Image: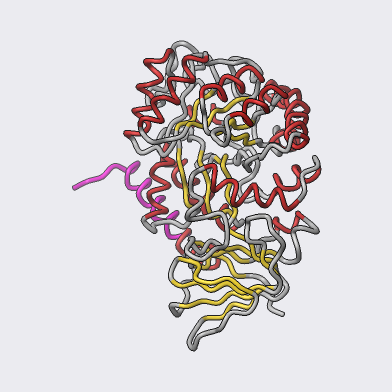
Amino acid sequence: MKYSGFYSTRFWMLVIAFCCVASMPAITQAQTPATSVTIIKAGRLLDGRGGAALAPAMVRVEGEKFTGVGANLPVPDGATVIDLGDATLLPGLIDLHTHLTSRMGVHWEDALAKTTPGHDALWGARNALVTLRAGFTTCRDMGPTWPYVDVDLRNAINEGAVPGPRLLVAGNYVSSTGGAGDARQFSIYVDVPVVKNLADGPEEITKAVRTNFKNGADFIKIMATGAVLSKGIEPGRQQYSDAEIKAAVEEATRWGGQVAAHAHGAAGIKAAIRAGVRTVDHGSDLDDEAIALIKASKGKTYYVPTLGVGDSIEQNGIKNNVPESERERSRKMQGIMFAGFKRALAAKLPAGFGTDAAVIEHGENWKEFAVRNKLGEPAAASIVSATSLNAEIINWQDRVGSVETGKFADLIAVPGDPLQDITVLGRVGFVMKGGVVYRDELARH
């Protein structure tokens, strides 16, 4: 049988790419404990629940779960002992707003016209590994450019084909005609027919929600307002009506799922809260009324800001091919976003932790901690946000978010004490997910 030159060339390119990834043992190969019991020792432990540090600290791991935490645990014969010296142990971090299948430097509008789902799948595998090694062992992925590539990535991670964080995925975000991320915003004679992300009116939105769950989504992302990095309606304007947002929540609830609402403007934020969404993501113009509505929801709705994106767009926008019109949108929104976060802090409103990677570089998720700290949030509160609070938001508090017996052994370590210097979270040197070590680079003392 004869094959065309195109297909044979493409086949060998994929083989070479796979072999290159597989030949990087320091990055891609996890270190599985040699025995059934592993003891990790360190200078201190912040267990993710906001209490005082345990110092010194020892953690016992059996299989994929924590089976002991204390200052001085017995070490059974034959156990593997990992001594991390004066490092600080923390639970694996959780990021509630990522785009792992997006490649930094490829604007999503260009991706629609110039890339393929395969491109995003391969870069998604790369980005998942980089994110895991940065200490983020759980992520919520907020919708890919090419629909359902994130579903495939989640499944590949779960099946052990590629290393990466535990993922909850949106599959395909839901937006309105002319709204944020409208994939049909080119010439009226140009279409991207495989990207069916538009739904107008409650009936179409209900069908879109059902379609996403049918195709493997874990939750629904709906675009309640315009976006910074998109043509169409301004980010401060509400693009879905109250009834349309409500339809998404009602249908997702029937499926046992949550809704995350992309929302920048105050009107869209409040419409999303009233509709009963689980998270208001970005939440830029969070005003006092919106804060009161979230508090009145009694834990039904949470605010998840993404505060580091403005600096990233300003510093790297030209290099990453962000149009000037969208960079200007970002400049206008940054001050509004910071003011909203400060109002939330003053009101003692819990804020989930999200980054919007790849608007920031994958693996640099830690920079969100630094921005929040600069705006007045104590380091201890930021760490709780990225651990136990985020676990509660996604209803995974029984499995991740804190170092407790019976939970998944998701554990990271950093040099020094992040309560004294939050930036040490950018120097993660040890990562364990489910009892398997994916990074072990801290110097022993």
The residue sitting at 50% across, 41% down in the picture is: 101
Q: Is residue 97 visible?
A: yes
Residue at the spot x=51%, y=62% of the render?
A: 433
Q: How many marks?
A: 0
Residue at image x 33%, y 35%?
Answer: 215
Q: Is residue 104 above or below residue 205?
A: below
* Left or right: 74 as drawn, with respect to 22: right
Q: Quadrant of residue 371?
A: top right
Q: Position of residue 210 (x, y in %)?
A: 34, 28
Q: Is residue 332 magenta?
A: no
Q: Is residue 29 visible?
A: no
Eyeballing the image, is 397 above or below 196?
Answer: below
User: Toward the viewer: 329 or 110?
Assistant: 329
Residue 36 is situated, as x and y percent measured from the top left of the image, at 43, 77
The quadrant of the rendering that contains the C terminus is bottom right
Residue 86 place in picture, x, y as percent? 73, 73
Segment tinted magenta in the rendering: 1-20
Q: In the rendered structure, does residue 8 fall within the stretch colored magenta?
A: yes
| Left or right: residue 170 compared with residue 391 | left
Between residues 350 and 178, which one lies in front from this camera angle?
350
Q: Considering only vertical position in the picture, is 166 above or below 61? A: above
Furthest-left residue in view?
A: 1
Quadrant housing residue 323: top right
Dominant SS in magenta? helix
Q: How is the image coloured?
A: secondary structure
- Of all residues, the one furthest to the top in this rendering is 188
